[in-house]
Each structure stands twice: as structure tokens, then as C-alpha cells.
Amino acid sequence: MIVIYCRISLDRTGEALGVERQEKECRELAARLGLEVDEVFVDNDLSATSGVRRPEFDRMLAEKPDAIIAWHQDRLLRLTVDLERVIALNIPVYTVTAGTLDLSTPAGRAVARTVAAWSQYEGEQKALRQKTANDQRAAAGIPHGQVGYGYRRTEVGIVVEPSEGAVIREASRRLLDGDSLRSICGDFQRRGIPTPGRGDRWNTTTLKQLVLRPSIAGLRQHRGQIVGRTAYEPIIDEDAHHRLVALLTDPTRRTSKGGRAPRHLLSGLARCGRDGCDGVMHRNAGWTPKPESTSQKPVAPAYVCTTCHRVRRLQAPLDAFIEELTIGRLEQADAADLFLRGDADAAREAREAIAAIDARLATAADAFAEGQIDGSQLTRITARLRAGRDQLEVALSAAMPPAIPLDAVGTRAREAWASFDLDRKRAIIDALMTIRVLPGGVGKRGFDPSLIVTEWRGAYVGNNIG
């Protein structure tokens, strides 16, 4: 069985023209040698040095051919471990550009191992040079590869793409005003706003990843760490970025189960106040009796503890009570001051320290470019500085207060509240207070406000997104 093996590492066009040329020349070689080709194996757009499995290469070896024809030895293999698998077949390998490798003799195997060793060395050196170049570009704030959604390349450099930048600003502003990822996605879909990438529908995962990208705030990320500033204009400011990170990565952030949007004001927000329970309360749907039933009465919808099932409160009066409590507090003259609880001094100190580290990272990159330090020194310096920067990022996020929309505070609070959708109302309630529903006790009838315990939280008023 005579086979041809073709491979190309990078197929930019997706048309496999490189492997077609290889196959053509390999067939011409087979004709000159008087060999009849039985099968062709092709791994397109796969590197032999990346460690990625090559399915056609594996399948070819499993067929145990009598001879292999390749365009060059490095098309067949570049890792010594792969060479040993071919040597184990004890067959000749014919190449278009490098002659015949007689792997059945010690001399032939020695030559093949030498060529493979140098090919592997070349691949490792190329990877090292690429890694160093990428580190250098990252330190200078320049992206490698494609630019992300919100930007485009021009003759003068990378600039903000106006329509995409506007989408990012709107989504960021609305999230900080209390809108949910789900409601924004639904609105974008209805408005026909094009999605990032190839998808035709907005989804919460895509939107979350989009607004959490450090690059839209002018922060250059490399290998999972912030290494400095980007060399192009930010779309939102850095404070907004840190507030978004604090909001969307908060482990206590409530999300609906099964991907379904919450349909009731306090489901998942109110908690059971029974001693030792602290379970989450959800709306228990009311029951409507069948028309022919006379013995059973309908049950009004209520919030029920999903842990102990022993605390229950009618939905309508509890919703109304919490809404009035929220609006009343938002209408008070000191509401803005009450809910502004961010630590401005701590945030300023963290930002200044981050800026100082960014300056040192840029200095180290310049020193490497000018040959004053080598690659290993640059790696040690940047690793130490990045570790300190990561700690400061955590401190800055902690100093950023949660979000309450500016128009929800003051004399127009009631009017604004009536215009808010359910997601925004839930977000505001969750930012302002904790809610505990105490057991009703024996013989209690009607709604008793004294059995609802609320505690105010700190929150933030307004935002500064452009």
C-alpha cells in the first residue's frame, strides 16, 4: 500500500491550495518512481509542532503502509516523537524536495533523526521569538491578531468603530443603571443591532464578555493579566470598567435558574426569617379549582421559603409594601448621600498606584527594546509588577460602589419607578436592602408589616460613562 501524506500549518484562505500543490507534486514523484498511489491522507491547517493531534496522520500510521510519499520531511513530521512512530513501520519515505529516507537502515534513521531534531529546534525557536514579540507588543499596548468588537484598523492605526462603540457604551451604561444582561440582549435583538462575531442573536454570555473586556477601558491584557495601557482610545472610562467588573463578577449576584428571566418582584430576593433557616423565597403559583369543584378554594399567589417551606407571605401585599418602602426612601432629600458609599480615597490611591506600575512596565519594555535588559530580565520584572497590579485591581474593584440610576432618586422617584421594567426594579431593591420575612405566628390574619425586616445597603447614584 503506497500512500501520500500532505499537511499545511496555516491555511489563510481555507481553500487548501497548499495541500493540493503538495499532492500534485507527490503524484508526479510516484509516477517517476513507478509507484501506484492507493490513498492520500491530508491534515489541513494543522501544525506539526503544536502538539495538536493530527487525525489523518494517526489514521495513516494505523493502515501500516508499505511506503510514504511526502513533499518534504517537515510536512510529514517535525517532532522526534512522531519520527519514531514512522521508524517503527520500517518502510521507506520518499520526499519531493529532500530525497529518500531509508528508515530500514541505521544510517537512514540517523539522518532522519538529525533532520527531525533540527526541525523541532527551529519550531521551538520560532515559538520563542513569537512569544517575545507578543510580550513586547503587549507592553507597548499594541494588540496582536484581530482587533475586537468596537475597534477597526485604519492607515493611521486602531480607532473606535462609531456604531459598535455606541453599542458598548449603551450596554455598559444600562448595566450600571440596573438593567439586566437579558433585557439588554432582548432590546438589541428587537432593534436589529448586529451581534459581535458570526452569531445572529445576542445572548447574555456574549454581552457579558463584551463589556468586561479590559481593552474597551484602555487596559492592555496579556496572558490573563493587565500589563499596561492600550495604544488606542478607550470606549468607556476605567472607573466604569471596574464597576462593571465588580457588578458582573460578584459571587453573590443573583441569576435566575435554568436561564429563565425572573417574573416576580421578590423571587430570589426575599429570604426566610425563621430561626436557623435563611432560605430563599420564591413565588408559589396560585391554584385555580376546576369549574365543577365546590369543595376547594383557590389559593392566592404567595412567596414561600424553598428550604423549610414553613414561611409563606401573600405576594401582592408584600410586593406593594416593599415598593412603597423603596420609593419612599428614594424620595428623601438625603437619598443620594445615603446611597453613595464608595471609598473615593481608596479608589484614587489604587488608581495612582496602578498608573505608577504601568509606567514601570512601559520603562521595562523600552529597556528591553533598546537592549539594556534581556528577555529573562524582562520576564522577571513584568511578573513581579503584574502581581502587584492584580492586587491593586482587586482593591479598586472593592472601592467601586454598586449602581443605582440617577433618575431613581429625588422628587421624580415615583414617576421613574413606574417606568422601570421588572429587571431594573429588582436590581434597585437588591442594591438598596435585604429583606427577611418572619413567620406569621398562630392566629395571624392579614398582612403585618412588622413581620417584614429590611436592612439598607450602600449603593451608587449615577454613572460617568461617556
Image (tube, helix red, strand yellow):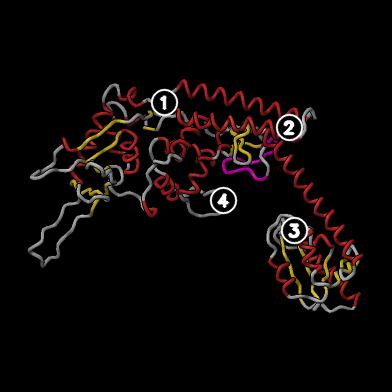
Residue at 48% x, 49% y is 205
In this orientation, does residue 13 appear?
Answer: yes
- Mark 2 and mark 3 in contact? Answer it, CB < 8 Å: no
Query: What range of the chain is rendered magenta?
Result: 145-157
Residue 117's x, y, as percent? 83, 55
Gap between marks 4 and 2 measured at Cα: 38 Å
**Which quadrant of the figure has residue 293?**
bottom left
Depth check, mark 3 against mark 1: the one in front is 3
Neighbour class for label 4 at 10 Å: few (<14), some, many (≥20)? Answer: few
Q: Quadrant of the N terminus?
A: bottom right
Q: Secondary structure at mark 1?
A: loop
Gap between marks 3 and 1 measured at Cα: 53 Å
Q: Which residue is mark 2?
A: 377
Q: Which residue is mark 1?
A: 342
Amino acid marked by disc 2: Gln
Amino acid marked by disc 1: Gly
Residue at 23% x, 30% y is 328
Q: Secondary structure at mark 3?
A: loop
Depth check, mark 2 against mark 1: the one in front is 2
Q: Which residue is mark 3?
A: 48
Gap between marks 3 and 4 measured at Cα: 29 Å
